[in-house]
Amino acid sequence: MFQVRIHGRGGQGVVTAAEMLSIAAFLEGKDAQAFPSFGSERMGAPVVAFCRISEREIRSREPISNPDAIIIQDRTVIEPACAFDGIVDNGFVLINSPADVETNLSNARVKCIGATEIALEQVGRPIPNAVLLGSFAALTGVIKIDSVIKAINTKFSGKIAEKNVKAAQVAYERTLGEM
Amino acid sequence: MLYQLEGSQAVARAIALCRPEVVCAYPITPQTHIVEGVGELVRSGQLGNCQYLNVESEMAAISVAIGSEAAGVRSYTATSSQGLLYMMEAVYNASGLELPIVMTLGNRAIGSPLNIWNDHADAMSARDAGWLMLFAENNQEAADLHIQAFKIAETLRLPVMVCMDGFILTHAYEKVDLPEQSEVDEFLPPYKPEFSLDPENPCAIGAMVSPNDFMEVRYMAHRRQLEACAVIDKIGTEFSAKFKRNTGGLLRTYHTENAETVVVAMGSVLGTIKDTVDDMNQTNGNGKYGVLSLVSYRPFPDNEIREALKNAKRVIVVEKAFALGRGGILAREVELALKGLDIEIVTVIAGLGGRVITKSMLAEVFRQPKGNLVFLGLKEDAIRQEYKTVLNKGGA
Amino acid sequence: MSSLTMGNRFGQHTTVQSSCDRPNTLTSGHRACQGCGEGLAARCAIDVAYTAAKGKIAVVNATGCLEVVSCAFPDNSWNIPWIHSLFGNTAAVASGIAAAFKNKGQADVRVIAQGGDGGTTDIGMGCLSGMFDRNDDVLYICYDNQAYMNTGVQRSSATPALARTATTMPNSQYSGSDPETGKNVPDIAMAHGIPYVAVASIGNLHDLERKVAKAINIRGAKYIQIHCPCPLGWGFPTAETVRIARLALKSGMYPLFEAENGVLVGSTPVEEQIPVEEYLRVQKRFAHLFGKNAQPENIGILQKIANRNIEKYRLGGMSDE
């Protein structure tokens, strides 16, 4: 079982990111479960979403408290949301930031990427979710970039899908190159 | 075919496969995505031959369904929480009129205080309304139960409420196997009501019944509930045979054979419970824990529950609602089913208003419950503090 | 056969009460009070609807007098597809029936919802407004006897100013239902812009029948409100029902009009307006306006209402502009 927790703010596509991640895993024949930290979501409020990926049937529905990977869509929520809590040893932390972020995590594989910048450049909108999934595929190897692309195409269509696919590919390549 | 879908969308597609002819939509969190989903299928023509009505309240939603079902067409609506309470007068009416409406209840707490998250207080408020009530453990079962529900409802001429946990299921993406239209058509034939409002063959539906006959009418309704057990079981078996999935029916057991302790629950918490029990059984190495998933809450399958639990030493009922001042609701009903057997019954009230239920919390209470009525994860410090404040003010 | 309780006393210039051609949708033997205005109105309205729709109608009945008197188990007095669900949801049930028939390709079945003023203007208002909003193909008939008669004459939002009811009982400090209160549902229906709104009365059965027949042939939401005097609730002899209804018309207290798509298109002129006293005096519910302790200005309040009706609904005749 591989467990992912995604932190961000309402309007950044946090929940959609978890959903796309689950679709990508599903397309690889895995069991996947995605769910939001249910609430009356409001633009700008801190939001958490979860995704479990497993070779076996996923039954448990408790929120993920010991994630194998954490995706931070907005670095301003790290402190208020205690976003790094419970990360497993040697877990992955992917942060949307053009510059390195001081994390105090001694035993985690931390990667920063300017996802909003890539999204603005490629899609024209500051929605970093698809970009981060591209980077996530490269960083963790848990899902293939092809599956991420297919998942993006499931959730979106037309020009938006096309541009998000491009953005995810850019992030994937850049992350691979920097590893 | 397998899909990775939000629970609400899976249910919306399952509903469309059942070819309802009238669907009434009124938004209430967390059910709303379901009626949105059905609406999209109607507007895009994927669900043809269906009237989709945007109504002005839950009272209207169920009432439109009463009218359309009385006029002889398959009808569907969905609600949650306050919405169920708002329509409650008509909920009773629908069962009294013997109209086989199918309604999804996206389970949510009831206020005040306002709370949009999951528990089963809404469902419990309708437990004596004469509806059949089925609880889904996961989104696959939620989809499957709706297909079974129309068949059960129309066989028995009784309305069916399919309960699925709000947010935890309605908003969760998971794998769901949706059958082909042709398969559903084979399983669920077109609706042919015994009676309906028909100018060619006029009948009157609804009457004023005097004390002279009312007891008999209610007794007959009681008998029909009892008879429903066999129908739900049979249709569940038929479904499993055709679709190769063990969903629906009255109940399911999990490692109960030699279990000393059996946990009984309804709905989505069963997945977490099963994982917890697996871990505990591995640690102890002797398979001491089992699980009973109750699908049919109304009718309540007393005999089947008694049969499944008769060898247990202890039964722990985990429930997401309770009767204020009294304790467990489901636990009391389980207790009644086990009357005369030497089995200890523990009530665990959990997950109220969406309170998180974790495996570690469950494991602790399963191992050593503190008393016969446990409020899982209750912040006792906060309660103590509150009492202190009240005492300081000279109150209770 | 004719019904002795339902006004076969009003002479030869009125509707045929007994004929082999009458469909008798509401059969004799029901349990309405002697002199019941609502029973007469319902029998005429639904018979006409039945004929206009060539027998293809389905009727939803709100809880209330009309329902209680016609469906005492195991009997039922309706010779048509008929359903009773609840008090406040009648319009929504009718919407559902209409949706079902539409989907079955049987839009020739005309759907009628009927209820009293309490079930319509008070508890049923939400569902009624929703039905209007969606322009569902339903004719809603409100039998307006101006109070909750089935529960023992309590005030509704259709109770006229200064009327005595069980919950507006006059005393030395209080003169009956407050003149500043009340709800004009025909106006509210018109504000929804629905295809047809009409007000009718059992004091003018030909007009009532014409309006129902017209409504049956219009698609979309229709609302007809029928003035139905109630001997028990208003306090008058049971033989006087129709006469009282006519006094209401002649005094201007109950204006008859029609509106299409929210616009007034016709009204029944009040040819020689009578003073409202003539209408009020014969009803016990207004007796306190005339007794020893009566306040004379109260009659003036009601006269003003009548005069305003005549002006507002052009009961003096429609102008030719």
Image: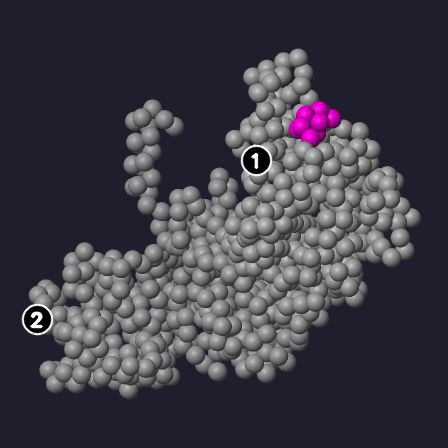
Figure quadrant of residue C104: bottom right
Above or below residue C299? Residue C133 is below
The residue closer to the viewer here, B198 or B109, is B198
The residue closer to the viewer here, C307 or B229, is C307
Chain letter behind tag 2? A
Figure quadrant of residue A8: bottom left
Tell me residue B298's x, y (percent): 60, 57
Tell me residue B310's x, y (percent): 59, 59
Q: In this picture, which residue range is highlighted in magenta?
A: C274-282
Secondary structure state at the residue bearing disc 2: loop
Figure quadrant of residue C31: top right
Q: Residues within 10 Å of mark 1 (few under 14, many from 20)?
A: some
Separation (CA) of disc 2 from disc 1 = 77 Å
Secondary structure state at the residue bearing disc 1: helix
In this figure, which residue is indicated by the disc labeled 2? A99
Above or below residue B111? Residue B28 is below
The residue closer to the viewer here, C268 or B363, is C268
Q: Is residue A106 left or right of residue B49?
A: left
Q: Residues within 10 Å of mark 2 (few under 14, many from 20)?
A: few
Tell me residue C124's x, y (percent): 59, 46
- The residue lying at 64 percent from left, 58 percent from top is C138
In this figure, which residue is indicated by the disc labeled 1? C308
